[in-house]
Amino acid sequence: MLNNTNIIRKDMNFKVSSSALYSRLTAASKVLASKNSMPILDCFLFAIKDGVITITASDSEKYFITSVPAIEQNGEGEFCIPAKTIIDSIKELAEQPLAISVNQDTQELKGTHNSGSFSVVAQDAAPYPMPRPVDGGTVLNLPAEALLNGINRCLFATANDEIRLVMNGIYLDIKPDSLTFAGTDGRKLVRNINHNIQSGLTTGFILPKKVASILKAVLNKDDENLEIHFDSDRATIKTADMTMHFRLIEGRYPNYNAVIPVNNPYIATVDRVALASALKRVSVFCNQSSGLVKVELNNNNLKLTGQDNEYATSAEEYLICDYSNNPISIGFSCQFLLEIANILEDDNLTIELADPSRPGVLRPANDDPQDEILMLLMPMRVED
């Protein structure tokens, strides 16, 4: 990245793949805020040097930095361009070389492609704020797939709490021989223990929900290893094609293990896809304010009941399951139970219960001992 004091000193001309540029711009745009206190943050910062186009986007708290190779380059420097303008101007282009020139005297940026051209006035890069790097701190290396899986499984369980801010993120609990991802909003909880990550470290941090959402959108399982560099309040995540700087959520994460019941006597195994389909149908008839669904287990059968007395509507669904203990019934949020069924990837899942007043535990029936997944759901009161 060039220093912001190095403004454009001569005309720049470069060519870049239109699809590669658009892909990187759309990824970077996920950091941008709808309203910014600094107008310059409505722009992308472009830096061209040594055949590489580096693109930075920020909302002043988070920074997304990515790059794309130039096909040709003549001159180097930095400039800012409104994000919406440049994205909208190239999103309909088929894959082709896009030639961009920047005039030093007028700051006019002109883009030329096979079927036409566009022009816009670029802005000086000097006022664009730059991220403060993490000094010292801790470095964690892990496969991108492991981070993506942890985010995909935990994100839905995070909160939007204005008081308990620590609940508004995913906790990465780093142990010498494992990495645990945890997310909870007090009503549902996810714990994913990855025993393949053996860092030799004992530490942890809370990944903000917004950052996790961006990473979910831009990471893919084909990415290789990534590096997380963090201290007490800031972190940087680096992959082969992007760097993201952001502020961590400060505070002590709750003891998530303490709320997980153990030795649950009532255990049923059910087809996950069939359960999800039945929950979708029943959800139409659940009370719209509570979303309560009644789950009854008895003699290898699982019964789902949703009803809304105010509108005199109700529905029942019956599923075959593996259950041979005493009958038991419990109430859950239909929406949350459906989300869990959709996120767990195994063909079958187990539902573990202790009594109607204690949380239910759901797991994949064939849980990987190296990548354990547990989801907890608080019960709801069922009116007799």
Image (cartoon, helix red, strand yellow):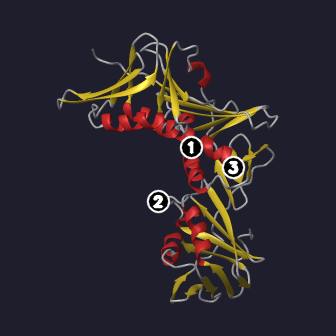
x and y percent of residue 214 in the render? 57, 53
Query: At 55% from the left edge and 65% from the top edge, which residue is drawn?
Result: 26
Pick whichever, 43 or 99, lies toward us. Answer: 99
Q: Secondary structure at mark 3?
A: helix
Q: Earlier in the sequence, mark 2 or mark 3?
A: 2
Amino acid carrying label 2: it is: Lys
From this viewpoint, is residue 234 visible? Answer: yes
Classify mark 2: helix, strand or loop.
loop
Inter-mark Cα distance, 3 to 1: 12 Å
Q: Position of residue 283 (x, y in %)?
A: 32, 35
Residue ID for mark 2: 35
Q: Position of residue 285 (x, y in %)?
A: 26, 34
Residue 144 is labelled as 3
Q: 380 or 305, which lies in front?
A: 305
Q: Quadrant of the N terminus?
A: bottom right
- Quadrant of the drawing holding the C terminus: top left
Q: Residues within 10 Å of mark 3 (few under 14, many from 20)?
A: many
Task: Report whether residue 208 is seen.
Answer: no
Circle on res. 152: 1
Residue type at the position of mark 1? Asn
